[in-house]
Image: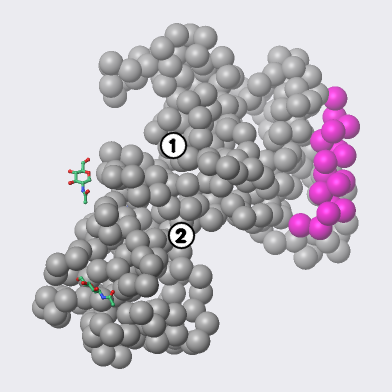
Amino acid sequence: MKRSVLKILILIVTLLSCTKFSSAVVRCGNCGRTPVPYPLSTDPNCGDQAYKIRCTAGTLWFDALNKSSYMITDINPLTQRIIIRPAGLSGKTCIASDMATEGIQLDDNLPFNITSSNTILLLNCSDAMLHLQAPINCSSNSICHDYINNNAPLCKSTSLCCVFKTGGSQNSYVVKVHINGGCAAYQSFVNLDTHWVPTKTWPAPAMELEWGLPQEPTCKLPIDCKPLLHSKCLVDPMNSGQKRCFCNAGFDWDPVNGLCRREKCPHGRGCKHQKKQTMLIAERLMDAVDPVLKEKATNLDLETMKALGLLAAACLDERRQNRPSMKEVADEIEYIISVAKGKVSAEG
Ligand SMILES: *[C@@H]1O[C@H](CO)[C@@H](O)[C@H](O)[C@H]1NC(C)=O
Ligand SMILES: *[C@@H]1O[C@H](CO)[C@@H](O)[C@H](O)[C@H]1NC(C)=O
Ligand SMILES: *[C@@H]1O[C@H](CO)[C@@H](O)[C@H](O)[C@H]1NC(C)=O
Ligand SMILES: *[C@@H]1O[C@H](CO)[C@@H](O)[C@H](O)[C@H]1NC(C)=O
């Protein structure tokens, strides 16, 4: 989005006098310069503990089973997707550098899985692979040969390679490699379409993971729910041994932003009034945006404007205790901008 538009929006939001209140559960601070969106957690004091990732020296890492780690290069909190860098080859061999863990294995008790957008090239395969049926393609004109020729010369001496697309239940959590039988190395690419014709320049290797939306945060004492405004610590009806911060009546759990959101519109005039006010603010906000820029705005830009509009509405809340503090507004704006810049980039 154009800087100038953002400046106008930020000015509008800032001009609205905002006072004391906290809206969301605690989002983790940046890792280096990379925002860590909710529910991902780099620390026991923030995010949701089921969604642990690691921040080491300003870089985010995804730790899989048996101590294999993969650098996180992108996070998209709106689609709940993470891009990791696959292991690659070990030294001057055609063997996966994560052979110690037999490739990538995710813990199936955790809410992360491998999406169906990955094309996996299996390299240095044994003849046993030839017995496998579609969707694994080990034919001599498979695109893996082209990849080897251009990008993995060390694998040239090996005769067999195969290709398959993720998405089956067998590879929701694993891409396996073996020293004896199967294939000894792999590479992964995101969103290569099925009719993709290989060229000299292959895209950067990447693997896409996704996370399931989080439930309400767990709690032990009422005070644990203080950061999640409009919630109470209650016994989880699905698991009586556990308590969660459930949103109060009139509010719904928003698992993407980690907050209790006022219900869209139940009955009663209060809600009608609220809705009208929000619409009014959104309209005024759009009026303030240069029409030419608005025409050029992408969907994401418009989403961003809407998010800022909602933030502005929160600031106008008549009830004082419902208003965010200036710092929270500043944090929220920074977060909205980071989302608007596209994905959260680990190397940005
Ligand atoms: C291919 O994999 C086998 C193990 O299955 C390994 O012994 C061999 O060294 C690998 N080839 C290369 C070129 O690294
Ligand atoms: C990975 O860890 C699991 C459980 O901790 C173990 O059962 C399995 O054998 C390990 N696999 C490898 C390849 O180390
Ligand atoms: C394997 O992939 C090649 C290249 O994309 C394609 O021409 C061929 O039809 C595929 N074979 C099978 C059995 O799907
Ligand atoms: C992966 O997780 C998502 C979100 O929980 C779920 O919708 C999807 O069905 C899962 N995919 C597989 C193959 O398990």
User: In the figure, residue 184 lies in which quadrant?
Assistant: bottom left
| Mark 2 vs ligand 4: CB below 8 Å | no
- Front one among 84 and 223: 84
Q: Quadrant of the C terminus?
A: bottom right
Tell me the residue at 48%/56% (across/down). 83
Q: Which residue is mark 1?
A: 52
- Residue 79: tell me if it is visible: no
Is residue 32 on the magenta stretch? no
| Residue 85 marker | 2
Residue 214, given in percent of the width and then of the height, sits at 43, 35
Q: Say what amino acid the circle numbered 1 marks.
A: Lys
Labels 1 and 2: the sequence-earlier one: 1
Q: Residues within 10 Å of mark 1 (few under 14, many from 20)?
A: some
- Front one among 247 and 51: 51
Is residue 224 shown above or below 125? above
Question: Residue pushed farthest front?
Answer: 92
Query: For the stretch drawn in magenta, what is the main secondary structure?
Result: helix
Answer with left or right where residue 28 lies relative to residue 86.
right
How far apart marks 1 and 2 lie (CA) works out to 17 Å
Tell me the residue at 19%/65% (across/down). 179
SS label for mark 2: loop
Is residue 47 shown above or below 284? above
Q: Which residues are magenta?
A: 1-17
Tell me the residue at 74%/17% (across/down). 20
Tell me the residue at 79%/38% (across/down). 281
